Image (cartoon, helix red, strand yellow):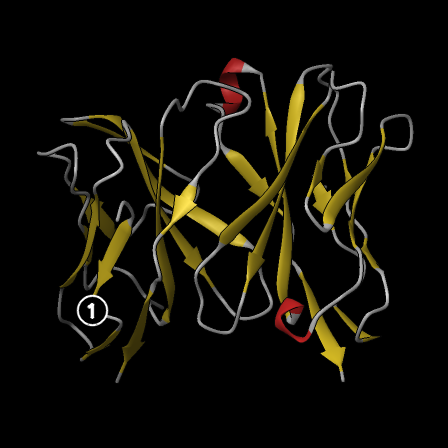
Amino acid sequence: DGGITQSPKYLFRKEGQNVTLSCEQNLNHDAMYWYRQDPGQGLRLIYYSQIVNDFQKGDIAEGYSVSREKKESFPLTVTSAQKNPTAFYLCASSRNPVSLTDTQYFGPGTRLTVL
Amino acid sequence: AQKITQTQPGMFVQEKEAVTLDCTYDTSDQSYGLFWYKQPSSGEMIFLIYQGSYDEQNATEGRYSLNFQKARKSANLVISASQLGDSAMYFCAMREARMDSNYQLIWGAGTKLIIKP
């Protein structure tokens, strides 16, 4: 079964800690994305990567970091510099990121709570 | 200014009725794409339907169709014969073809749809 997996499903973090959210895809997609979702709001782009070993900041990259060492994997680290990290985090991938019709497919999400 | 506006924060609809979810967008581009996604309470975003700005026909996908009115800049999602499993958040998103947009999706705030038995 092709798809996108995210782990863990729920994550609790103490203030001042860095945490890493995992995202893996076996769809052979070139592009991967990280979004943040807050209650009552649409998705906001944190980082995206159109190719291995390259990634770009999205609209709200401050306090986050990513890496893209393998095509299948795009982990997101939420650093202690992120002031309000409690949110739902969604990872997505797509085949052709510079096409107008390119469809993004999503993983099940990770809910991060700061204690 | 909001690029994607979904004016209905929440809707209640009787099972088996058709439902229309509104989406208006703002762009000066001639070339763009519009997407609808469904987000059940489990959280995963599920792609439903796509409409390109140059598509002459309204997009359809099973019980989903798009009422695309280009001059009005609206792309309303129509769900026919609603089912209890349609209860979810629904998001409209747009991609512009401009280089400075980096081809990224712009998202609306969503509409919460609840289907009543």
- For the question of whether residue B2 can be seen, the reply is no
Mark 1 burial class by Cα count in 10 Å: few <14, some 14-19, many 20+: some
**Residue A43 location, x and y as percent?**
50, 53
Q: Quadrant of residue B57?
A: top right
At 65% across and 59% down in the image, what residue appears?
B110
At 86% across and 67% down in the image, what residue appears?
B17
Considering depth in this image, is A27 or A114 the residue closer to the camera? A27
Q: Vertical placement of A42 versus A101: above or below?
A: below
Q: Which residue is mark 1?
A: A8
**Residue B10 location, x and y as percent?**
75, 71
Classify the position of the C terminus of chain A by image quarter.
bottom left
> Exactly how many numbered labels are in the figure?
1
**Residue B68 location, x and y as percent?**
82, 34
At 44% across and 42% down in the image, what residue appears?
A59
Q: Quadrant of residue B25?
A: top right
Q: Quadrant of residue B82?
A: bottom right
Using residue A19 as the reference point, say whether residue B77 is left or right of it: right
* Residue type pointed to by label 1: Pro
Considering depth in this image, is B36 or A45 the residue closer to the camera? B36
- For the question of whether residue A102 can be seen, the reply is yes
The residue furthest left is: A69
Using residue A72 as the reference point, say whether residue A100 is left or right of it: right
Is disc 1 placed on a helix, strand or loop?
A: loop
Output the chain of dot 1.
A
**Residue A68 location, x and y as percent?**
15, 35
Q: Vertical placement of B63 versus B59: above or below?
A: below
At 49% across and 31% down in the image, what residue appears?
B104
Q: Vertical placement of B62 versus A78: above or below?
A: above
Using residue A99 as the reference point, say whether residue B54 is left or right of it: right
